[in-house]
Amino acid sequence: MAPAAAELNLASTELPGRRHQRHRYDLPPPPAPAGWARSLTRQLAAVEGDDMWGGRRKGGTGPQRRAAVIGSQGHGKSTLVRALSEVLPREYRQPPQPLGQFVTARGPYQLYDCLDPDDFRSRLAVGAGQLSGSLLVVSAQDGPLPETREYLAAARAAGVARIAVFLGMRDLVDDVDIETIVELEVRELLDEMGYRGDHCPVVHGSALEAMRQGRSRKGRRDVVRLAEALDGHFG
Ligand SMILES: Nc1nc2c(ncn2[C@@H]2O[C@H](COP(=O)(O)OP(=O)(O)O)[C@@H](O)[C@H]2O)c(=O)[nH]1
Ligand SMILES: [Mg+2]
């Protein structure tokens, strides 16, 4: 005759005759095969886009910040990336840094020099959350162009919270009024794209002048001011 349910005490794992056997879900999981956990960690890091912006995982003091350098083709993105990573270590009396890296008072920076808006969008799709912000480069000679707008739209759509602006190629513009007008245009465009234009830092300068050693103290100062603006705005 079958025992009554109360006698079996179905809610308990301690059924009659199985008093010394633990429930199978209480058993420890089987040991992971060697190398399995390490491999999974690497895979997860890739999925989370750990290297999406060419970032280092270790090194320097303070947190690693990542910024994507965006802006129309030919407006001086790559030249600015070079200027920041060559001029800042000299100005701050630090050891030389690899291209795209520099260290400010707040810690190390990794810049990613975008190839085009598609490159930016594809990286944002995986690693937008890792960006401290984007550094928008606009030539003071040309002002914002359709590609500038395209980059900002992509940043906005992916939720990039902060934009800092470098208004470059100042050496090619002799009229201060033109620089002022271009700055206004950039701030208007930022407003239009959903960023608060009057809150974004806009630093004027010339990356090329900054790299001409000995020639332009002023050029180098502009690069230092840009690094300080990034610290202030991106944190
Ligand atoms: N005169 C001048 N030329 C610059 C300056 N910055 C960049 N250039 C030149 O502009 C051209 C495009 O610059 P590049 O950095 O390749 O632009 P990118 O396409 O945005 O990466 C190159 O020939 C640079 O030497 C600048 O501050 N002054
Ligand atoms: Mg380039």
Image: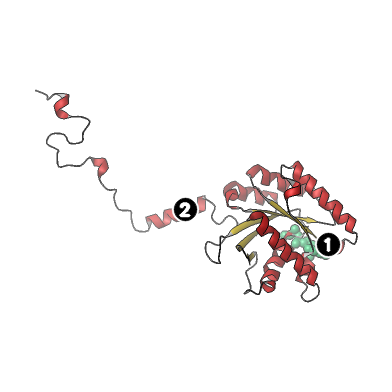
Residue at the left extreme of this rendering: 1
Q: Earlier in the sequence, mark 1 or mark 2?
A: 2
User: Residue 201: x and y, percent?
Assistant: 73, 54
Q: Secondary structure at mark 1?
A: helix
Location of mark 1 (residue)? 170
**In the image, which disc is placed on residue 143?**
none
Tell me the quadrant of the picture where the C terminus can be found: bottom right
Q: Residues within 10 Å of mark 2 (few under 14, many from 20)?
A: few
7 up-or-down from 196: above or below: above
Specify whether tag 1 is near ligand 1 (CB below 8 Å): yes
Q: Give me the residue at 62% from left, 69% from top.
A: 98
Tell me the quadrant of the picture where the N terminus can be found: top left
Tell me which image quadrant ligand 2 sits in: bottom right
Quarter holding residue 216: bottom right
Q: Give me the residue at 73% from left, 65% from top.
A: 223
As measured in the structure, the alpha-carbon distance from the residue carrying label 1 to the one carrying label 2 is: 45 Å
224 up-or-down from 16: above or below: below
Name the amino acid, label 1: Arg
54 up-or-down from 150: above or below: below
Name the amino acid, label 2: Gln
Q: Nearer the viewer, mark 1 or mark 2?
A: 1
Residue 114 in sight in this render: no
Q: Judge from the rendering whether residue 55 lies leftward or rightward of residue 213; answer left or right.
A: left
Q: Judge from the rendering whether residue 31 lies leftward or rightward of residue 9; answer left or right.
A: right
Q: Are marks 1 and 2 in contact (CB under 8 Å)?
A: no
User: Residue 207: x and y, percent?
Assistant: 76, 65
Location of mark 2 (residue)? 43
User: Residue 82: x and y, percent?
Assistant: 70, 66
